[in-house]
Image (cartoon, rainbow, N blue to C red):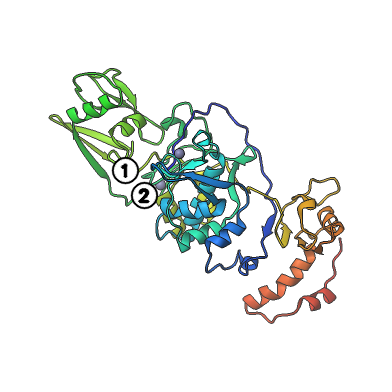
Amino acid sequence: MPVPSRMHTQALALVVLLAAALAVPGSHPAAAARAWQVTEVSEADLARLSRGPVIRVGFQTRGREPIALPLEVYVAQVLSAEGEPNAADGAAQSLAVAIRTYALFNISRHQRDGYDLCATTHCQVLRGSSAASRRAAYATAGLVLSYHGAPADLYYSASCGGHTERAADVWPGVSLPYLDAVEDDVHADDATWTFERSLDDIRGAMARAGVRGRRLDDVVVETRTASGRVGRVGLPGLEPASMNSNEFRLALGPTELRSTAFTVTRSGDRLTFTGRGYGHGVGMCVIGAGRRARRGESTADILKAYYPGLKISVGSTDPTGFDVVVNATPLGMKEGDPLPVDVSRISPAAFVGEVVMKQEITPFLAAARERGCAIQIGTDMLFEQIPAYLEFFGFRTTTPDELRTIAQISY
Ligand SMILES: [Zn+2]
Ligand SMILES: [Zn+2]
């Protein structure tokens, strides 16, 4: 689970992103049907599909050299480590988008170490990819969550326990308005955890974290955040006698005190913490995403629930190397519009399609035709799809050519 390395005080304005072009690589036999059905995906497929930077991953193990992974291979390997093993597709795909976004935002985090991201919880843990993690990376290839037109600074955590946490309440000074506290109504049946320690053990852990004092009299909850988590912890007898609960948790060990959503009771010199959830609780909750997917929520529903205010967009719209390019955006329709992709980078051998039906030759199609590409107008898409729809729903079917002869289209 990633944690932030620096403070963000900048307040960014929200911008609306237009969905970018859907570019389908033709080199993979399953690619044409990517949205419909994908059975087996290999890391070689993911490497071919990868756009954007190669991720250099460093291992904090002596003598182990950094490795370079194409972006989508990296996403599949992190998903295998950070995700639930048998998560439903919507959950795996949502986490794949978050992992990819995290990687692109934090790409220069370990620049001074000679690589991009480390393989520990400081950045994102990875392990060998699985068939399911490769499928999820493949299905979401190139998709990122954007803020202000660029990959967003975001986090995710194992289990929020019922309410996610506002980023600024965990890391004071972090101002990311889309990482707000939101209710997660899939945790009603969660069991609570307990953690027990003596006052003296806790004093020892605090001393190792630099908090002075020979005696700890008690541990008290001073404030609670909007999500109900502990905000500040009172430590009477120590100096300072109050601490941010996230620092308190890290000082005790984040796998011991599993979250800051706890209550504390004292019996003699023993303290019992009873809590819910696991992790800092900021952003997507991996357990919750799994439950949402199982009750029928889509990838987009899940991402919207945990990252309200972020837009899903395609990280790269470079059409180089694609055999089929379809414009599914509202760009390139009118004279003078910016085109959805750099047409000079489309191969003349590529097939270029448009879904717009208001006019036949859009400026985008005109530019592609000029480059020598085979093109397909928007209404053609319709004629090709109608027979497939009819067949799917069990109606008497027809042919695209038959439709073309009887259709009356006025622009
Ligand atoms: Zn790191
Ligand atoms: Zn949750």
Secondary structure found at label 1: loop
The vertical placement of 230 against 318, above or below, is: above
Mark 2 or 1 closer to N-term? Answer: 2
- For the point 53% across and 56% down, the residue is 137
The vertical placement of 314 against 355, above or below, is: above
Q: Is 225 or 57 nearer to us in this picture?
A: 57
How packed mark 1 is, by other alpha carbons closer than 10 Å (few <14, some 14-19, many 20 or more), is many
Residue 289 at least partly seen: yes
In the rendered structure, find residue 276 and report the number of the disc placed on it: 1
Asked if residue 22 lies left or right of residue 64, the reply is right
Secondary structure found at label 2: loop
Asked if residue 274 lies left or right of residue 167, the reply is left
Q: Is 55 or 381 nearer to us in this picture?
A: 55
Query: Which residue of the protein is positioned furthest toward the bottom in this rendering?
Result: 396
Cβ of disc 2 within 8 Å of ligand 2?
A: yes
Tell me whether circle 2 and circle 1 mark residues in contact (CB < 8 Å): yes
In the rendered structure, find residue 187 and report the number of the disc placed on it: 2
